Amino acid sequence: MPKTIFHSTEKSNFILNMTEEQYSKLASRGLAIAMLMTPLFTLIPEIMHEGLTSKATYAISAGGLVAGGVIAMIIAIIAFMKKYIGKRLIVPIGAMVIMELWGIFSLTRGVILSYSFYGYPERGEGMLAIIFYFCFFASASALKRETALRTIIDGIVGVGLLNSIIALIQVFGGVLSRYVLITSDTKINAASGLSMSPLFLAMVLTLSLTAALISFISSENKKRSIGMLVCAALFSFVMMYTYSFIGFCGLGFALIAAVAAVFVLKAPKKKLLSVPVSIAAAAGAVALVFAGAIGNISSYRLYDGRILWWADAYMRVSASGTFDPRVVDIDDTADVYFYLNRRAMDVIENNPLTGTGPEQLAFAVFKAPEDLSGYSGITEVISASKGSFDKVYNEYLYTTATRGVVSGIALVITVLSSVALGFAAFRKKRSAETFTIFVLTLGGVLIFLIGCSSIPYAPVFWTAAGAACAELKSDKQKKAEKKNAEKTEKKTPEKNTKKAKA
């Protein structure tokens, strides 16, 4: 007999009567849509930047995260109501709850509380965003069917495809982008897609490329295989136009994962074709630069420092000052990353308990001028402070610096337990879906060592990490549940008939 509340109709109580299979179908499709919200909303500021105004705000992109986050939140509430998040998830869910609560405590220590909660303007990754990430994670961790994992994987590929289509326009058209110039006269047409920064795009494409390659290798459907191979080639091609160390690391990780997938999943050796195809696509992108076909450059090199510091943090977001050439070589990628890490460790040493507050790192590293009368806002003050910065491209250090040591430890526990549960799920099921999700989670955890969270990337990662924790039902369990449901349905009419006779 269907459950109802206060004698209401069965249709109005669909959540109470929802089966695990129905939840998994609803949740996976909802999460796939939610992951697309931020990039879709980012189309608006990119188009506005090119057409109507140069002051288009990425607060619209943050609105996309809110839209996707609300979807994830509704799904998470259903999961908790249905008790689909069991004891098996106590470590990752518990650690992430601690990270959330400590982040709220840290928020109160921020210089500007609105920035801590809503996020720094043009970044949008304050405490509200972190709460939404928990919803993505919890919703995905409650999935019960492998078909749901496949939907999540396809959603991650879809995010990469949407970003890459816009990236091609940016690279060959030199439009819809704030990264055409990397200096006042060096035109490189860097690709940021709909991820706000080439470095954030490289992080997104790391997961999308990995998902596409393993899907090609594991799929027995010819059309799906061809589609995934085309996507993999496209992602590899576009990734080179991020001109980033993250891009090369992401490509390397995806190729290693593809080779491993062939042997672990016992796929035909001809599927190794995906590796040279991806390498050829990446090499073709680099060759076009050397041929002088892109921008006004004729040689290929990495521009991580200039992208993250000058083009993104200073020019786009006004969250940092210009770099100080006396203390850091902006054209030396290693020097830039090591410098940011060293400064972050200094901040941690001075603020170990609460950190600076979410999205407040810039306030801990800049020097305010004595006379503030000539500035109209805090972003102008920060921009005038040479050597200041707002992001550390190591998420573990960044979390610790901005939200305290407790949050940093909780983040590490969350991601490592997710990897462990993902590996355990693969060993138990040994399916293409569990292997892909495990590898995606591992890739995201490693990328966080050289990258930082952002509203286009984080929903993708936390959805994959949550799916890695999912406790999938075996075929025997599903058959047993089906038999029990059939028995219950048979018994119910008999009881109702006896009551009627009485």
Image: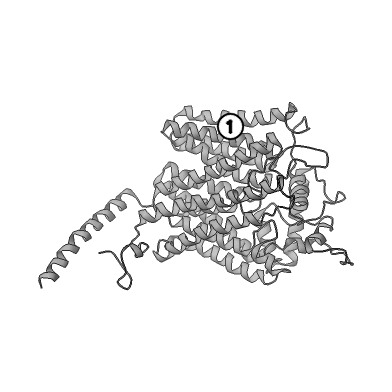
Q: Amino acid at mark 1?
A: Ser
Residue 254: name its quadrant.
Answer: top right
Question: Residue at position x 54%, y 35% from top?
Answer: 231
Quick one: SS at disc 1?
helix
* Circle count: 1
- In the rendered image, the quadrant that contains the N terminus is bottom left
Picture coordinates of residue 322, whole percent (x, y): 82, 52
Position above or below: 75 against 424: below
Please indicate whether residue 9 sits to the left or right of residue 367 in the image.
Answer: left
Question: Which colour scheme appears in the figure?
Answer: one colour
Please indicate whether residue 382 sits to the left or right of residue 447 in the image.
Answer: right
Question: Residue at position x 46%, y 59% from top?
Answer: 75
Residue at the limit of the structure toward the right, as seen here: 371
Please indicate whether residue 19 sits to the left or right of residue 294 in the image.
Answer: left
**What residue did someone put label 1 on?**
278
Picture coordinates of residue 274, whole percent (x, y): 53, 31
Q: Can see residue 450?
A: no
Picture coordinates of residue 441, whole percent (x, y): 54, 49
Residue 430 versus residue 321: which sits nearer the camera? 321
Position above or below: 131 against 40: below
- In the rendered image, the quadrant that contains the C terminus is bottom left
Q: Residues within 10 Å of mark 1 (few under 14, many from 20)?
A: many
Picture coordinates of residue 418, whole percent (x, y): 51, 54
Residue 259 versus residue 132: which sits nearer the camera? 132
Residue 387 versus residue 490: which sits nearer the camera? 490
